[in-house]
Image (tube, rainbow, N blue to C red):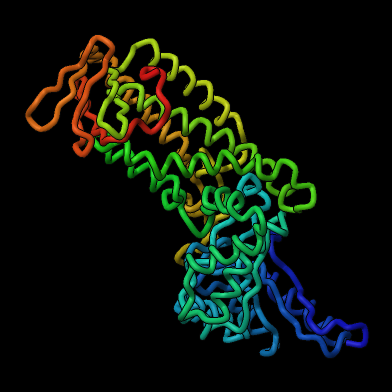
Amino acid sequence: MARGVDWLVVAFDDIPNRAGLAAEQVGVVEWLQARITGPRFTVVPTEYIGTRPSPYLSELGAGLASTVDVMWTGPTVCSPRIDAADARAWRAALGDHPLLLWDNYPVNDAVMDAELHLGAYRGRTPDLSDEIDGVLLNPMVQPHASRVALATAAEFLADPAGYDEDAAWRRAIHDVGGSRAGAFGALARACADGPLMVPEQLRLHQLIGVVERALPDPEWGEAFDGLRAELTALRGAERAYAEAVDDPLAGELGPWLTQATREAEAGLAALRLVQQVRPVAVRDEAGVGRVAAPDAESAMIHAFALLFAWTGARQGRMVVGGPRFALHPAVVQLGDGRPALDVGLAVREDASATDRLCRLALREYRVWTADPDPEVRVEVGASVLLVDSEAGFRAAPGVAVLVSSGSSTTRVPAPGGPPFADPRLS
């Protein structure tokens, strides 16, 4: 205490367990307490995960003084969800010592070092605060980027019942990102998955789902808007930090910003290829338009462009938009309290939004190659409009036309055009 130390943590984590270990650890703590008076003592046990009793925990809990805190990470090392019942069970297994939640979020060391955990604090129920005596969060190797998770956790802990995860996350992105909050937010949305959130909940995956469901409909182009905007913002994030020598986030985020550009380029190439195998048209305010069917050579060029961009994305190691293969340290307890690996939590594979979108685009291209109809039709209601030798047509400006080729149909208002500038219409 005279040296300013009022809290002493004795960590016995991540060492091999064996018979008699708990009694030896109790002896170490008692030896320290006899020689260092005053500080609060906290023990990190060798078994620090789970919700079930074990011989080690029973012996440790019975031997430690009742005032000694014991740390716990929840049902597993990086727990997706922790509730009050979990905490009560762990406290019972230890004999009702003061309980500190050592929450392993947003930590990304060891097997998780290719991930950035930039999502909000989540998965902890409000009633958990009634069963624990404190929470410590384990930050990432990137201290400034860690402030997103820490800020949202602080909001949860200040008011568990009133916590608004999305609003807290937006505030944290604004505060941490500063003048580059837009770029930082784009990257963070693509790196929000991790132990507390599965990749399928990422905004990119959700927007790909919107596109996938819309492809059979004439309004498919409108469904591109959200995903195109998200990929464009993600592609621009690296450029926003390119000369940010005064921003510590630039150095921390560098490898992920580079990977974000690769992933976004591949995603945008995929959307362009989908457009290439559909009929398109451009119309001005007067309703005058120009139409084009899919062109075999142009579509093939776009298919190659996709393959090259996708190859570049897959060569990167850092996780942006969900992992291609990732590991989490998902140690859990068996029914008798012994440790085991939860394979379902430990291994995440084939969860990349980019891969999903590229495969979707190539599937659409393959379907078109099976029936590459070169003819194109323009219709308004039941009427087929005349298309001249220059592929031009005219329709009333207040009426949308349907442009068809083979089994694909595209709705085009006036004014209107395809999601991307299209060489077929030049």
Q: Quadrant of residue 385?
A: top left
Residue 121 picture location, percent across and down: 54, 66
Q: Give the residue at x 51% y 38%.
A: 324
Answer with left or right where residue 2 lies relative to residue 406.
right
Q: Quadrant of residue 85?
A: bottom left
Between 156 and 299, the residue placed more toward the observer is 299
Q: Give the residue at x 40% y 18%.
A: 426
Q: Is residue 181 visible?
A: yes
Q: Quadrant of residue 275?
A: top left
Q: Is residue 105 visible?
A: no
- The N terminus: image quadrant: bottom right
Query: Which residue is farthest left?
Result: 382
Q: How many marks?
A: 0
Q: Give the residue at x 35% y 30%.
A: 418
Residue 235 picture location, percent across and down: 56, 38
Residue 223 picture location, percent across and down: 33, 41
Answer with left or right where residue 393 lies relative to residue 132.
left
Residue 371 picture location, percent across and down: 22, 15
Between 154 and 70, the residue placed more toward the observer is 154
Q: Measured along the vertical axis of the image, is residue 255 above or below residue 39?
A: above
Query: Which residue is farthest right?
Result: 2
Between 385 and 149, the residue placed more toward the observer is 385
Q: Give the residue at x 27% y 23%.
A: 279
